[in-house]
Image (tube, grey):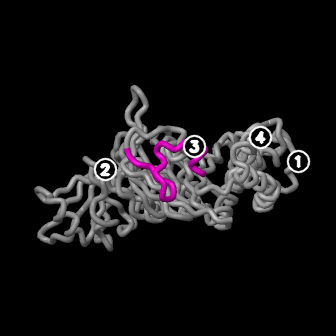
Amino acid sequence: MDFVARVALESVSKTFAGNPPAVDDITLEVQDREFLVLVGPSGCGKSTTLRLIAGLEQADTGRIEIGERMVNHTPPKDRNIAMVFQNYALYPHMTVADNMAFGLRLRYGGWWKRIWRYWTDRARAREFADRRKEIPQQVGEAARTLGIEALLSRLPRQLSGGERQRVALGRAIVRRPDAFLFDEPLSNLDAKLRGEMRREIKRLHLKLEATMVYVTHDQVEALTLGDRVVVMDRGRIQQVGRPMELYDRPQNRFVAGFIGSPSMSFFEGELQKLGGDDSLAEFRGGGLRLRFSECADLLNSARVSDSRLPVHLGVRPEDVRISPWRGEVSHQGESQPENAGKVVLLELLGESAMIHVETAAGIVVVCRSDGRTSVQVGEMVELAVDPPRVHWFDPATGERLGGRSCATEVVDQTG
């Protein structure tokens, strides 16, 4: 099978009456054979973007291309795309084989269209008749690809959720479209089936080498499936990149907080120059007090006044370390020391554990630890951060500041 198509959107916007823009001036290109995932919270515009590509919604402004064709005013049936929905959209009275063949039979005409075509264009009628004869073969090929040959004679009510989703995929495959569009196809499945179907879709993409655009609110799904991932919020694209690029170098605080499970922990505070050494600085805020080296570029580029830079510090769970508390336990009414906190929640996940620690400032930071940890809820612990793994963000704009971190080593951590 050969599915090749480029999908492009240029300055596309869509607004529904009485609401803010659902899609706000987005420009995006999906390369031939690429698996692109649109991800974001509910209402971010990802499904509307997919429906604009499919032709189920009309863009207010901008240009949409599939292949080399502009399709803004092309009906959905003529765009040669296949869409897979979350509710499967199977006809309950039809067998699996008939459901998979339904779109092709419509394309090549029912009996009355065949009669009309016979009298108006006999060459075209013969071509379509030959194509109709190929439908059973195409259905069989798609069924073999998905491993559902044994289900072809069954009705949808006789299928499990995963089997119904495979039938919906098969119906898309038999059409041999230029591009596949997926609108949260796994959201109705339980966790185990969702994992199985995620792997199935990934294998399908590798086998077909097709252009696929996939919408989900699940960032884990996005990172595991996408060649590239588009993070959206409030109708706008926040960042486009490969999964690990989004994880390691988020462009703003929204992306940093949305991508990753558990999400990044944030601390509001100030980065201050220390003494006459332009490269040495201390961060203080949110119950943390950390000293870093090699901060000159970050501090100077920000044009810091009075040697102070208001910042948000972000750190991922795997970059936070905890150790037993070596100081005195604070009593009620006494403030906790910096770089320490109390364990308020412990999530045991088998080989790993998520330890939630509340600092003196009331900030809860999540630490990923070994599943055999002996830490208990209510226990005081010391916190340490891996300096090169720290992220800095502008408090006013939320945009990323400098590189991943301004530091290569911790000069001092004061409790």
Q: Is residue 164 visible?
A: yes
Q: Give, as a three-letter code, the residue at label 1.
A: Ser
N-term-proximal mark, 4 vs 2: 4
Crowding near pointer 1: few (<14 within 10 Å), some, many (20+)? few
Please give left or right for residue 274 compared with residue 221 in the image: left
> Which residue is labeled 1 in the image?
153
> Which residue is labeled 4 in the image?
115
Please give left or right for residue 395 compared with residue 38 in the image: left
> Regarding mark 4 in the picture, which secondary structure is present there?
helix
- Give residue 387's mark: none
> Compared to 22, does 182 lie above or below?
below
Between disc 1 and disc 2, the foreground one is 1
Disc 3 + disc 1, Cβ < 8 Å: no
Number of numbered discs: 4
Q: Give, as a three-letter code, the residue at label 2.
A: Gly
> Regarding mark 3 in the picture, which secondary structure is present there?
helix
Crowding near pointer 2: few (<14 within 10 Å), some, many (20+)? some
> Which residue is labeled 3 in the image?
76
Gap in angstroms between the C-alphas marked 1 and 4: 29 Å
Q: Which residues are magenta?
A: 62-80
Q: Give, as a three-letter code, the residue at label 3.
A: Pro
Gap in angstroms between the C-alphas marked 4 and 2: 63 Å
Between disc 4 and disc 2, the foreground one is 4
Gap in angstroms between the C-alphas marked 1 and 2: 55 Å
N-term-proximal mark, 3 vs 2: 3
Across and down, in percent, residue 153 comes to 88, 47
- Give residue 398's mark: 2
N-term-proximal mark, 3 vs 1: 3
Which of 319 and 235 lies nearest the eye of the viewer?
235
